Structure formats: C-alpha cells, structure tokens
Amino acid sequence: MKMYTFPASRRVLSGLLGAFCVAAFVHADPSLLNPQLTVGIDPTGLMGTYKIDGPIDTQSVFFQSLGSNGRSCGTCHLATEAMSFTPAHARRLYDETHGADPLFASVDGANCATVARNDRAAHSLLLNSGLIRIAIAVPEKAAYSISVVHDPYGCALQIDPTTHVLTASVYRRPLPSANLAFLSAIMFDGRETIVPLTSAATVNANRRTDLLHQAMDATLGHAQAAVTPTDAQLNAIVDFELALYSGQVWDSEAGLLSDDQAKGGPLNLSDQLYHPGVNDTLGADPSGMPFTPVSMTLYSAWDQSERDQRGEYEDDRSNARANIAAGEQLFNSAPMTISNVRGLNDNAALNKPSTFAGTCATCHDTPNIGNHSLPLPLDIGTTHTSNPEFESDPIIAAAVSELSMADLPVFLISGCPNPFNQGQAESFYTTDPGKALVSGNCADFNRVKGPILRGLAARAPYFHNGAAANLHELVNFYNLRFQMTLSERQKNQLVAFLNSL
C-alpha cells in the first residue's frame, strides 16, 4: 500500500499522523492491505486507486518529465486524490517551494502566463480553486462574436504572441486520469475526442487513439516539450491510465464501502459492465433497453427495508449505511424540473420541451459511474457568472449564488439565436463558452460534459471551474437550479451518497 509522501521536514508530523490513521483503517479491515491499491486520507474517509495489473510504479513514464518545465503527468494527477489534485495540495506545494514546483509553471499554472513564480496572488485560481488556465484559439469562422466585459487578470482575450490568433483564457479543473474505460468524451469540451467513443465495436481502439493524442498534446502543451514524445512513451502513459480505477473505499462513519453486499470501492468499479450508450437518456442504448433513472445500485443492500428484513439492529454504522442508501435512492428518484438547459431543452430528440421532469440520472445515466454514456455536453448554469449584472435567468442566478465561484473573466457572446425562443437573437454572458470555443457553433455555447462521479470525496472543488467548494454547495446548487425542494435531511443523505462514490 502506498500513501502520501512528505518531502518537507516540517510535514513529518502530518505524515506520521496520516500514516497512523491509514494504519488504523487497515487494522480495522486488512483487505485494504493490497499492493495494487494506493490509499489516501480524504475528508470523509479513504480514497483508493486500484491498478489492475500490479502496483503503481512511480518510476514509470507517467511520472517522468518529458518536457522542459519539470512537469510529468503525475504533477496534476495524484493517486491519493482520485488522480486529480486539490487546492490544498497546491497550497502545500507553493508554501514549500515558493512557487518553484513544476505545478506552477507559468504556461498555465498561473492566472496569466506573464507572471513571476513568486507572485502568490497571481496564482490565486490554482491555489484557491485548483484551476488550470486553458488557452484556446477562437475559431476563425465562428458563428458568433466574442468580447470580454470583465477581465480581472488581463489575459482573458488576446492575440497570442506566437500564433497571432485571437485566444481566450478559460480556467478548468484537471479531470481524473482514472476510470477512463467509461469515458464517452475526452476533456470537458470534447476537444481530444479525435475519433468517437460511441460504438462497442470500435470503442477500445478509438479510446486508445484519443488518449494517445491527449497525452501528446498534454506533453507538448502543459509540459512544454520541445520534442514530441515517442510512440513507446505515449503508449506507456495510456497503458498506465487505462489500468487505474479510483473510488472511495472506506467511509469514516459507514466503514468499508464494499461490506455487507455493497458494491462500493475501486475493486468493484474495475468490474463494472459498460458499453457506449448504456442506459442512454435519449433512448439510444444499442442493446435496445429503455432508459431507467435507477442508474445507481451500489448500496441497495444497505437500504433500510433490506436491513429490517435481515433483522439488523440500529447503531451508528448501520445508520450511516442507511443514509448512504437513502442518498442513492434520492439520486435515482428525486424529481427535478429541467428548463433552459442547452443540450436538453433545445434537443430535437426530446421534441425541444420548454420544461420536463427528470432526475439526477437524466444527466448522469451511466450505471454506477455517473457520466453520460454517449456524448451530451450540457449547459446547466455553471458556466454562467455569479455577477447579477450579467445573469438574466433568476433560477440560474439563485443557484449560482450558492457556489463559491472564483473571480473569472466574463465574455459577451453576440450574434447567436436564442435556442429557447426561435428567431430571436440573443447576446449573453459566460465565464466559459465550453464546446463552442472548439466548434465555433452557437448551439454548443456553455456546454461541457458531466464528468465521471467516482472518487468525488478526494477531489473537491467540483464542476469544471471548481465553483462548488464542497458537495453541500453542489447539492444546494442542484436543489435550486432544478427546483428539487429537498429537505436538509435529504440534502445530507445525498451528500453522504456522493461522498461514498
């Protein structure tokens, strides 16, 4: 079993305490002592990253610097943080190295590329929200015009000095580099989906093609490599990634998440059945099975009625398990009112309904995984701004007000039709144009994919822009955005379930 390493002497005590806590968990359940399982402490228990073909080798290509700035894939993807990283990790590194760690390379580890490493304030988005700056060229033949109305860092929209192309800076969380076998799109905006992941016949070969391309772009971009990695290096990175499965393995209140017939944890996740389109919301499952909102079944054995049938007595642990099971049921059944969502309410496959009833599984349909099993980027409101001057939808404004959104640039988009009022032009504001910044199409504005939900407890903050500081904020956002009218107890149960993933 591997755990955090603590390179600075002033973190020795923290390391000892962490090791003691992990040892206590292992003593409680020796099944955690698995050489293929890397375990780390998170706010609600233990995160586990399971490598199906053997222990993680920290000398492998994934952890080697292939570029010019000292970065490796492992700089932003930590096994103990569900193969992403948290702002707390970034702050520790910054304090220890005064910004010299490769994570803070100015190419994208600072608010803008021209700042000094020792300028802490100029790294605020990374340190406070875990955001990496993504510079994307505005498509030359875009169907819209873009301008900036709020530019807090001075580089939101500028002519790139190297390419001489108009380029927008958007700020996003690093997606986990585990659980990749379940992806239907690569990156939040799908820009690395070079060949589609939509057919069972081609998905394995196409996934490798896409991930090889993504690894190459990441090395040339994030790591600033002067030379393209070799085929052998790229294949080694992809082989490593495809062997990883991350998920919460132990809950501090409920205990082992694979105990008593439950199916939590990364070992069970590695056996999860999947095919492109499984349980598709729009009815495109190639097996012919209709969509069901019962997309999560990990903890059905912990349901209160199941406990009663088994004659279990109530104690703190069994109550915690019952809360997780209740949260899972809410995920599957709590009603939502879905309106003004680009990708759904303007979708011809749904007859473009102005509003319709749904559940969490409407957008998170892949069974026990939580992303969409076919590409369906959506605009649920998280790309909008918390500035009331720039948000006209009162429902979205109320929902966004529940979040801890960073001070992000705000763009004005002009020249696009309103998808919910045919024939009516609309100008609107956004902190991230999403897929439209890649495609140039008005229909793609603000649309980003919903990521895989496994491993949430170890990788706050949430949403593409880190706007939800914790899962309580996330649930409060959904509760208002989709008028769920959850009670406080139900919110807590839903949070307990999401933390168990």
Image: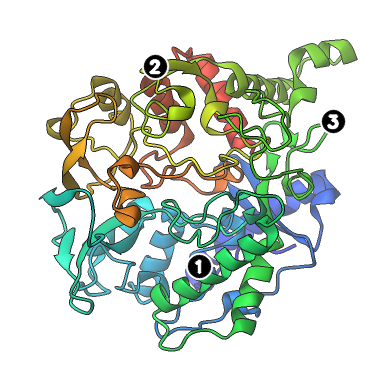
C-alpha gap between disc 1 and disc 2: 37 Å
Label 2 neighbour load within 10 Å: few <14, some 14-19, many 20+: few
Relative side of 255 to 221, left or right: right
Q: Dot 2 lies on which element?
A: strand
Above or below, comparing residue 125 to residue 342 in the picture: below
N-terminal of the pair, mark 1 or mark 2, is 1
Q: How is the image coloured?
A: rainbow
Quick one: which residue is furthest to the bottom in this view? 227
User: Can you identify the residue that label 2 sits on?
Assistant: 355
User: Can you identify the residue that label 1 sits on?
Assistant: 214
Amino acid at circle 3: Asp
Label 3 neighbour load within 10 Å: few <14, some 14-19, many 20+: few
Q: Dot 3 lies on which element?
A: loop
Q: Position of residue 349 (x, y in %)?
A: 48, 28
C-alpha gap between disc 3 and disc 1: 40 Å
Could you say which quadrant of the image residue 355 lies in? top left
Q: Dot 1 lies on which element?
A: helix
